[in-house]
Amino acid sequence: QVQLEESGGGLVQAGGSLRLSCVASGRTPSRFVMGWFRQAPGKEREFVGSIGDGTAYYANFVKDRFTISRDNAKNTVYLQMNSLLPEDTAVYYCAGNGGRILSGRPDYWGQGTQVTVSS
């Protein structure tokens, strides 16, 4: 079993930055892709980005504002969010599954961390 734990959410003004972290623990597969989804109030959960073997993928709405990175030695993935907009307000979830591509329904989820962007 794999556990994912996020940290780093909070309240920030529009135009500001936040960095989310997600640590994976437990019996992670040798090839384990991790990434981020988010869910705003009243909306469906949506893909934000992912990183597997060093290649990062992003949703179109990210538009070079967000960067995903990974520290394999620490089993940690990061989401650096810059130029935040009020519409980025959501609960951000870390997710992961075995392989190189993050599934639309990953096997593992974190508990979520709230990001609130004020205008």
Image: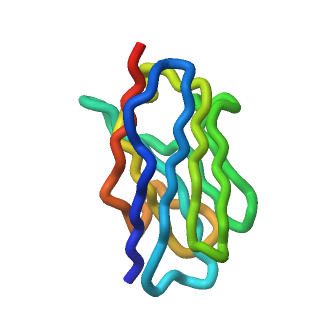
Depth check: give the residue in front, 14 or 4: 14
Q: Position of residue 4 (x, y in %)?
A: 41, 67
Residue 105 to residue 98: above or below: above
Q: Quadrant of residue 12?
A: top left
Outermost residue, top direction?
119
The image shows residue 99 at horizontal and vertical percentages of 60, 73
Q: Nearer the viewer, residue 45 or 16?
A: 16
Residue at horizontal 65 percent and vertical 62 percent from the top: 70
Residue at image point 39% right, 19% down: 118
Residue 114, x across and y down, in percent:
34, 41
Side (left or right) of 38 relative to 56: left
Location of residue 7 (image quadrant): bottom left
Q: Vertical placement of 59 versus 78: above or below?
A: above
Residue 45 in view, yes or no? no
58 with respect to 10 (left or right): right
Is the image coloured rainbow, by chain, by secondary structure, or in one colour? rainbow
Given the current orientation, which residue lies at the most extreme left position? 42
Picture residue at 46% right of the left edge, 86% below the top? 27
Query: In the rendered image of this protein, does residue 49 appear above or below residue 111?
Result: above
Q: Residue at x 60, y 43 (%)?
A: 80
Q: How many marks?
A: 0
**44 to the left or right of 36:** left
Q: Nearer the viewer, residue 82 or 90?
A: 82
Q: Quadrant of residue 119?
A: top left
Q: Quadrant of the N terminus?
A: bottom left
User: Residue 5, can we see it?
Assistant: yes
